[in-house]
Amino acid sequence: MARLPRLRLAGMPHHVILRGNNRQPIFAGAADHERLLALLAGHAAAEQVAVHAYVLMPDHFHLLLTPATVDGLPRLMQALGRRYVRYFNDAQGRTGTLWEGRYRATVVQPDPWLLHCMAYLDLNPVHAGLVGRPEDYPWSSHGHYIGQQAQRFITPPPAVWTLGNTPFAREAAYADRVRAGLTLAQQMAIVDATLAGWALGEPAFVAELQGATPRRLTKARAGRPPRAPRPALPSAS
């Protein structure tokens, strides 16, 4: 079956995942994390892509981004991937690929699913057993949203501004939201949509989005399409 083209729409949030080849580590130390973030900030600004959230895991990373143009996201990811591989290979005295093929991405409903995705990113290090609490992990945007450290290249999405009328109220509300966690169904929906490239959101949102693109946005039903009913035979007279 032919692979569907990536779903990319200007002005809409996207969840992006890029993994290391064969799940190999893509960071050897703190300097590598810092270099990737610096490259992300620089190329995102150049390509007019807003960075809402991120988490850098040992063998992959997640990003939540909103491109201003249709081509902004692929240009950002191409530049980021190439520049970081060149840096990492030089620093480690290695050659060859670092990434497991192309990045995975999908469009996310701005509210409430973008906030669900942000919590999913923040909880990734906890679920992986790297830390006990999201705030203890230094390589995610969680600290920015709870007031631990300001990161200038982070652009809060509109949904964050609805969490409170003051910075302190928003930070507390966001921390509570992440602490509450996600249901298993929400986690599975985020993973399935991003890996397969399906739109992530409520049915009405997906249906409206489908009207803006000819590309299929949801998983097709299994099996053959139902047959049309046979015309009734004329009765004998």
Image (tube, rainbow, N blue to C red):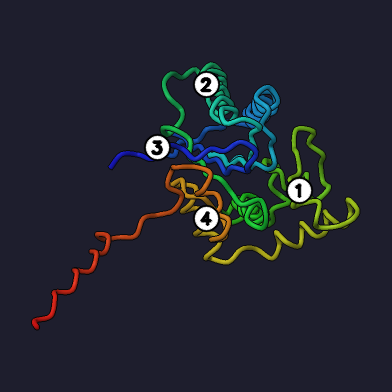
Dividing the picture into quarters, in which one does residue 180 lie? Answer: bottom right
> Residue 217's spot in the image, x, y percent?
46, 49
Instruction: Tell me the mark number nearer the camera, choosing from 4 and 2.
Output: 4
The three-letter amino acid code for the residue at tag 4 is: Ala
The three-letter amino acid code for the residue at tag 3 is: Asn
Mark 3 highlights which residue?
Answer: 22
Q: Is residue 16 left or right of residue 196?
A: right
As helix, strand or loop, the secondary structure at mark 4 comes to: helix
Which residue corresponds to the image point at 56% horizontal and 23% vertical from the top-left? Answer: 84
> Residue 207's spot in the image, x, y percent?
52, 55
> Residue 103's spot in the image, x, y percent?
48, 35
Q: Depth check: 177 or 97 in front? A: 177
Instruction: Tell me the mark number nearer the camera, choosing from 4 and 1.
Output: 4
Quarter of the image containing the N terminus? top left
Mark 1 highlights which residue?
Answer: 158
The three-letter amino acid code for the residue at tag 2 is: Arg
Mark 4 highlights which residue?
Answer: 207
> Residue 216's spot in the image, x, y percent?
42, 47
**Is residue 30 in view?**
no
Mark with earlier residue (3, 2): 3
The residues bearing labels 4 and 2 have C-alpha atoms spaced at a distance of 36 Å
Mark 2 highlights which residue?
Answer: 82
The residues bearing labels 4 and 1 have C-alpha atoms spaced at a distance of 22 Å
Mark with earlier residue (1, 3): 3
Circle 4 Cα neighbour tier, 10 Å, few/some/many (<14 / 14–19 / ≥20): some
Q: How many marks?
A: 4
Instruction: Tell me the mark number nearer the camera, choosing from 1 and 3.
Output: 1
